Amino acid sequence: MLLAAANLTPHDITVLFLSLAVLLGLAKFLGELARKYHQPVVIGEILAGILLGPTVFAQISPDLYLWLFPAEGSTRTFLDGFSIMAVAFLLLVAGLEVDLSTIWKQGKATALVSFTGMIFPMVLGCATAWAMPELIGKNPDGELLPFVFFVGIAMSITALPVIAKILIDINLLKTDTGMLIMSAAMVNDLLGWLGFAMVLAMMQGQASDAGVVQTIALTLVFVGLMLTLGRWLFHRALPVVQAHTAWPGGVIGFILVLTMLGAAATEAIGIHAIFGAFIAGIVIGDSSHLRERTRDTIYQFVTNIFAPVFFATIGLRINFIASFDLATVLIVLVVAIVTKTCGCYLGAVWAGLSKREGWAIGFGMSARGAMEIVLGQLALKAGLINEQLFVALVIMALVTSLISGPAMQRILQRKAKRHLSDMLSDRQYISAMTATDARTAIAELAEVAAAVTKLKAADIFEATWSRELLMSTGIGNMVAVPHARLEGLARPVVVIGRSNVGIDFNAPDGDPARIICLLLAPESDDSAQLELLRMVAESLGDAPSRSAALAARGYMEFLAAVRLPEEAHVRAKT
């Protein structure tokens, strides 16, 4: 009855669930594929939309494309509503990453880097948009002034979640440089979204200057109240909610209600709902009572369900090939990368940091990622920009996210942090070893390692067994780590075997080893062996992951077991 009242026919419901299933399924598959090759997940999610949209799918089967993703009607309305909800929750997650106390602790350096990192891109972006609006991508029906300000903001905004992930990957998050990048990015995010709210106010109040002023004033009042009284009230209310509701449903429900109220408030003011969700996220994330488990649950919920669908829908209505304009893309890339990098570099140097640190901060701050795409999508829907500029902004967001990490690694000579799951494949895993003693176990693992490394199994065995005779490598908790450094080995290699009966590796606790990890490092790499040992400790160091690994019935189940603590470790660091 309710569905009928909402004008959703059985056909509409069928198409709706099929379209969501296809969007989410392909977006998750390609996102995980991108993650496997150490690329931003958002690349795979956007690619899913491009494949399902006018760029590919509509060219192959236009009728089926319009049936699955209709241009109008109840299904289209629901998908649009779901997209708005998704982007609001995505901005909630971005707001949760903003730590106001960190911003204050960094003081002068944060102020200089964030200021120069915004003013340089803002000025040159505005000047470029003013000088050549048609070439850049102004909508012919739109006003020039809001467009100019939008381009300046688009060039200066950052992507806090992407930056955090990059810093984790290169072991830089907890360093002084990493914390400075994070705090400056927080300021950029806050000011950038506030600026975009002003642009929307200018657009929605074009007919009346008084209306624009009123909207901007109400927005500033909303932000001021939320960051003062709102913070205080939420901080006091959260322990009460946690004490009297079931976890996690009660707390998460409370947080989502506040987020939707904030979104509704800014939409009523005349600013897009996502700005209210972002400010609500800052208020919620700033409370010391917010448990890390709750934060992680929200993060997983949003990034694995809502975000993939949102980014996939980006490609559903735009032909990326037809809308690609080389001149626009090149201009956007040059202005975005050069101004952001150089601006942050100057701010860092003026704050007293070295030139090397300055360039690293500049490239770190240049990553735009998902936030740039969200910004462009909202501007496109508002009629502020054309499809050519939107495509250029998507490309710029992806390119800056791809180059940021490698550039920082090269400048600071930092290695990307790897995990045990990154080192494994089904060729390097024995689900049921036949060996019953340490010597034959090492020989069995050496045979597998030989096939992977192209070295002789006898040489691998000799080096590893010689090391084992010097000191046993049983580390306890049913894990052993026989290891060796080999001449001629091109890269570190891990081979893992699982024993059903257990093998005596003379562990301190006396228990036989059931998970034996053969760790091979190049002779010339002094740090590789320690890095491999760290990976094993991180992935198999807690009882739940070991139990799941021991119970694994095949390679995929074992891989899933070792990945759980790795992912938890990453989220804890953010």
Image (cartoon, grey):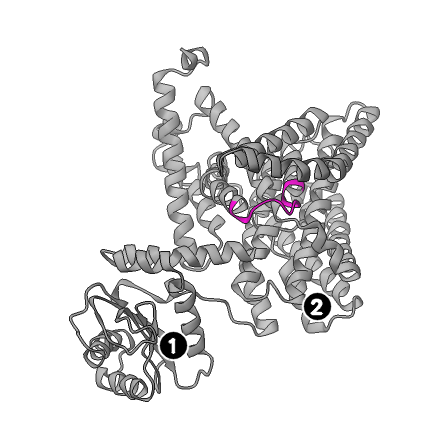
Q: In which quadrant of the rendered view does residue 413 lie?
A: bottom right
Task: Give the residue displayed 69% in from the left and 42% down from the top.
Answer: 193
Q: Is residue 363 above or below residue 71?
A: below
Q: CA distance from mark 1 to mark 2?
A: 32 Å
Q: Position of residue 254 (x, y in %)?
A: 57, 32
| Position of residue 297 in the picture relative to residue 453 (left or right) | right
Please state, as top left, top right, bottom left or bottom right, where the C terminus lies in the image: bottom right
Q: In which quadrant of the rendered view does residue 269 lie?
A: top right
Start and end of the magenta stretch?
A: 283-293
Q: Residue furthest left?
A: 434
Q: Position of residue 337 (x, y in %)?
A: 65, 58
Please state, as top left, top right, bottom left or bottom right, where the N terminus lies in the image: top left
Tag of residue 233 = none
Q: Position of residue 567 (x, y in %)?
A: 45, 55
| Residue on which disc 1 sits | 491
Q: Is residue 287 magenta?
A: yes
Q: Can residue 379 be seen by looking at this rendering?
A: no
| Residue on which disc 2 sits | 358
